[in-house]
């Protein structure tokens, strides 16, 4: 596979906004939990906070997908074939990025619905305003598991090779917590009760904090060299 020059590749300039997008999205999810439990606040505040976080997650996932597509081979393909090139799966990183992006879109839908429901009820009872979507949580879990592969970490974390394993592990643990949150948010058909309010909220909070830490570690630092990034762009 060919080497992509850091002078022409969009990867270096997209690293920081990608990390910031994930960090801000994680922060919004972390803040959404205590906001949803504060009985003095309108539930809609927490609802829109969760939705804002999901949009920021999608922004970060979109940029990550763009980076995964940018380092695919055959970059000399004509401009008119750009979208066809983006849609061709050729690396494990590309696959993980697509799965993650779809997962964030699932969260967009569920948080949007939850925010609208919260705005309509105006209830001041402590409740998990956003009940984690099982499909989105599973997709996050699958994507994070794939991202543990050395090939994916080499491509994504070329600027942070000393932190690569920690970043991938934190994202994996965060996805597990989101999965537990989805299980805890299961509503019993017979009683209408949430299975575990503690895990519904706690899983979301702990997962968001893991994602936040991983995103902050991904932010390029001064000591991160261009040469280490170049190695990540070698297929």
Image (cartoon, grey):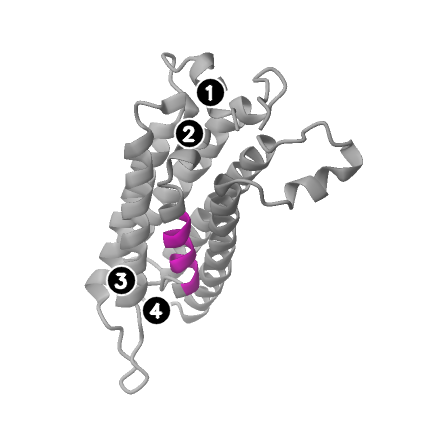
Q: Nearer the viewer, mark 2 or mark 3?
A: 2
Q: Please name the residue that numbered disc 3 is placed on.
A: 200
Can residue 170 be seen from the camera position used here?
yes
Q: Which residue is at a point 68% across and 40% down the rendered structure image?
A: 85
Give the distance between the C-alpha atoms of the residues marked 4 and 1, in whole angstroms. Answer: 53 Å
Can residue 33 be seen from the camera position used here?
no
Above-or-below relation of 63 to 122: above
Q: Nearer the viewer, residue 48 or 122?
A: 48
Span colored in magenta: 135-143
Q: Please name the residue that numbered disc 2 is placed on.
A: 154
Q: Please name the residue that numbered disc 1 is placed on.
A: 231
User: Farthest residue in the front direction?
Assistant: 1
Q: Nearer the viewer, residue 39 or 234?
A: 234
CB under 8 Å between discs 2 and 4: no
Regarding mark 4 in the picture, which secondary structure is present there?
loop
Which mark sits nearer the N-terminus, 1 or 3?
3
Q: Nearer the viewer, mark 1 or mark 3?
A: 1
Q: Is residue 198 left or right of residue 144?
A: left
Regarding mark 1 in the picture, which secondary structure is present there?
helix
Q: Which residue is at a point 74% across and 32% down the rendered structure image?
A: 77
Give the distance between the C-alpha atoms of the residues marked 2 and 4, in whole angstroms. Answer: 48 Å
Q: Please name the residue that numbered disc 4 is placed on.
A: 123
Give the distance between the C-alpha atoms of the residues marked 1 and 3, in whole angstroms. Answer: 41 Å
Q: Nearer the viewer, residue 84 or 167?
A: 84
């Amino acid at each position: 596979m060919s080497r992509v020059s850091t002078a022409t590749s969009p990867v270096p300039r997209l690293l920081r906004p990608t990390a910031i997008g994930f960090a801000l999205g994680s922060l919004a999810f972390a803040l959404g939990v205590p906001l949803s439990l504060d009985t003095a606040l309108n539930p809609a505040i927490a609802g829109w906070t969760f939705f804002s976080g999901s949009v920021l997650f999608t922004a970060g996932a979109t940029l990550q997908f763009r980076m995964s597509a940018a380092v695919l081979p055959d970059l000399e393909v004509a401009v008119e074939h750009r979208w066809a090139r983006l849609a061709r799966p050729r690396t494990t990183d590309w696959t993980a990025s697509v799965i993650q992006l779809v997962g964030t879109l699932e969260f967009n839908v569920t948080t949007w619905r939850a925010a609208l429901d919260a705005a309509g009820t105006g209830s001041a009872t402590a409740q998990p305003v956003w009940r984690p979507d099982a499909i989105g949580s599973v997709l996050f879990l699958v994507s994070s598991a794939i991202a543990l592969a050395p090939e994916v970490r080499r491509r994504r974390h070329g600027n942070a090779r000393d932190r690569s394993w920690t970043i991938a592990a934190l994202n994996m643990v965060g996805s597990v917590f989101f999965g537990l949150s989805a299980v805890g948010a299961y509503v019993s058909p017979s009683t209408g009760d949430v299975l575990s309010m503690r895990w519904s909220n706690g899983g979301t909070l702990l997962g968001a904090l893991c994602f936040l830490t991983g995103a902050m570690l991904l932010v390029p630092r001064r000591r991160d060299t261009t040469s280490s990034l170049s190695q990540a762009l070698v297929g």
